[in-house]
Amino acid sequence: QVHLVESGGGSVQAGGSLSLSCTASGSFRWAALAWFRQAPGKEREFVSGISVSGGTKLYGDSVRGRFTISRGNNERTMHLRMDSLKPEDTALYYCAADDQRVVPAQSPQYFDYWGQGIQVSVSS
């Protein structure tokens, strides 16, 4: 079992920056971690993912070059630095964990564990 808690987020004007963090707890040895987001009326979208070792980092096309994912010193933490934010980045952001894969998939169906979600709002 993996329990995930997101923190950070908030509101910012376009061009600004925000950071998200995810802390995982529970009875697991390792897990690939990822961020997804969902805007009202839209499907859940892959944002970024990081492998168990932190050596593989994946980004969705819409955020590549603007967002940076990393693992904390504690392997059970993950961070997402979001720069050059755009109004279209506005969404509920979810942390997800997969304890069956070393490298995270980019589809939400492969993740069994989810955080409660945290809001990111970008105004123009």
Image (cartoon, rainbow, N blue to C red):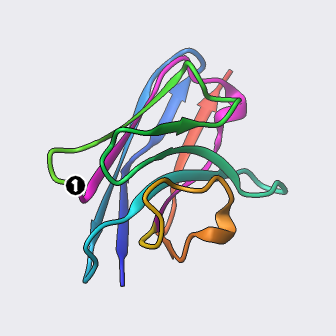
Residue 106 locus on image (x, y percent): 64, 52
The residue at the far right in this view is: 41
Residue located at (41% from left, 49% from top): 51
Residue located at (35% from left, 38% from top): 55
Residue located at (52% from left, 51% from top): 35
Residue located at (64% from left, 27% from top): 123
- The one nearer the camera, 32 or 66, is 32
The amino acid on which the numbered mark 1 sits, given as a three-letter code, is Glu
Quarter of the image where the N terminus is located: bottom left
Residue 48 locus on image (x, y percent): 54, 42
Q: Quadrant of residue 26?
A: bottom left
Residue 78 included in the magenta stretch of the image: yes
Quarter of the image where the C terminus is located: top right
Q: Dot 1, crowdedness within 10 Å: few (<14), some or many (≥20)?
A: some
Residue 96 included in the magenta stretch of the image: yes
Q: Secondary structure at mark 1?
A: loop
* Number of marks in the rendered image: 1
- The one nearer the camera, 52 or 120, is 52
Left or right: 103 in relation to 54: right
Q: Which residues are magenta?
A: 75-97
Residue 39 locus on image (x, y percent): 73, 50
- The one nearer the camera, 4 or 86, is 4
Residue bearing the label numbered 1: 75
